[in-house]
């Protein structure tokens, strides 16, 4: 299958020494999908979508989660004029941001990983398809405004994920090589973007099952940032770095 990226799976030893890490935001730094689901469900019901029946989680996962707002506007409101549909999407993002202030939680182990990145003085960037206002709010709520010098937003690049453009832009902005950088992602589209930009991708099982992440090309799949599978790789990189210094 030529469209399946799994044939180019990378291993961690190929990127020694780690110079930089790129992070997706939604589903990777924080489990934000339940907040998006809640916001869509409330607002769609309010306007009588689906005869006033609330959308199901299945509908959300299959038809909404991870989609771009322009595509979702066309999908949800094929009979509306596009401006009006986009106004609905913007209002939904406003509700998302209001809810996120109370409800947004970091993925387990995020703080420990960020400390490790800080201690090693690695370069880093956040790379997302979310609107910039959402991205900046989430980063700030997670206490990472100083941690991330750069936030790359898909809609500000020539092409958003699953194309490699946002990840290539991030590498360029922080001055890192794909040969010494890896990516954290939780969606198939995000993993494909990272792999297409020439980097190994660690998949997080926040919302998607392991086989979906592996099929998209994830080098390894972890539950969260406390996963021993991740720390084994990071400690191995550290051990190699110490050995290289000793020579
Ligand atoms: C996704 O949307 C289509 C079109 O509205 C619908 O027929 C289908 O049932 C939806 N999928 C789920 C899982 O609800």
Image (cartoon, rainbow, N blue to C red):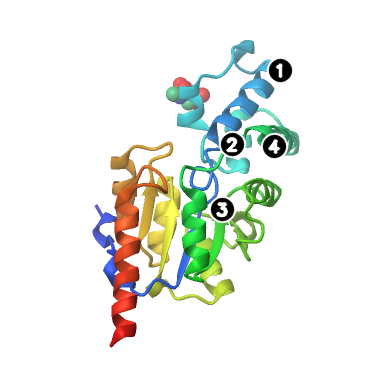
| Whether label 2 touches label 1, CB < 8 Å | no
Q: Earlier in the sequence, mark 2 or mark 4?
A: 2
Name the residue beneath numbered marker 1: 46
Q: CA distance from mark 2 to mark 4?
A: 24 Å
Residue on which disc 4 sits = 101
Which element is circle 3 on? Answer: strand
Separation of residues labelled 3 and 1 (CA atoms)? 29 Å
What's the residue at 69%, 47% (across, down)?
137
Q: Which residue is mark 3?
A: 128
Q: Are marks 3 and 4 in contact (CB under 8 Å)?
A: no
Of pointers 4 and 1, the one earlier in the residue sequence: 1
Viewer can see residue 217:
no
Question: Whole-percent x and y of residue 120?
Answer: 47, 70
Distance of label 3 from label 2 (alpha carbons): 17 Å
Quick one: label 3 or label 4, which is nearer the N terminus?
4
Q: Is residue 247 above or below residue 205?
A: below
Q: Which mark is residue 72?
A: 2
Q: Measure the C-alpha gap from mark 4 to mark 1.
A: 22 Å
Q: Is residue 117 above or below residue 44?
A: below
Disc 2 crowd, CA 10 A, few/some/many (<14, 14-19, 20+): some
Q: CA distance from mark 3 to mark 4?
A: 19 Å
Query: Marks 2/1: CA distance?
Result: 18 Å
Q: Earlier in the sequence, mark 2 or mark 1?
A: 1
Q: Secondary structure at mark 4?
A: helix
């Amino acid at each position: 299958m030529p469209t399946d990226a799994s044939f180019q799976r990378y291993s961690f030893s190929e990127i020694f020494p780690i110079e930089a890490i790129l992070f997706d935001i939604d589903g990777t730094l924080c489990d934000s999908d339940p907040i998006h689901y809640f916001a869509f469900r409330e607002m769609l019901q309010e306007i009588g979508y689906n005869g006033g029946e609330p959308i199901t989680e299945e509908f959300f996962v299959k038809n909404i989660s991870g989609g771009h707002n322009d595509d979702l506007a066309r999908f949800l409101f094929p009979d509306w004029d596009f401006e009006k549909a986009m106004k609905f999407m913007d209002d939904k993002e406003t509700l998302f941001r209001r809810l996120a202030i109370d409800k947004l939680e970091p993925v387990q182990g995020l703080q420990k990983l960020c400390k490790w990145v800080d201690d090693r003085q690695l370069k880093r960037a956040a790379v997302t398809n979310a609107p910039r206002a959402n991205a900046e709010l989430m980063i700030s709520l997670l206490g990472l405004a100083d941690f991330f010098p750069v936030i790359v937003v898909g809609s500000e690049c020539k092409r958003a994920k699953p194309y490699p453009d946002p990840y290539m832009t991030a590498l360029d902005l922080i001055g890192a090589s794909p040969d010494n950088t890896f990516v954290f992602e939780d969606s198939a589209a995000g993993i494909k973007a990272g792999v297409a930009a020439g980097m190994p991708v660690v998949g997080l099982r926040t919302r998607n099952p392991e086989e979906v992440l592996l099929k998209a090309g994830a080098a390894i799949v972890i539950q969260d940032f406390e996963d021993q599978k991740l720390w084994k790789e990071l400690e191995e990189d550290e051990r190699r770095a110490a050995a290289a210094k000793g020579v």
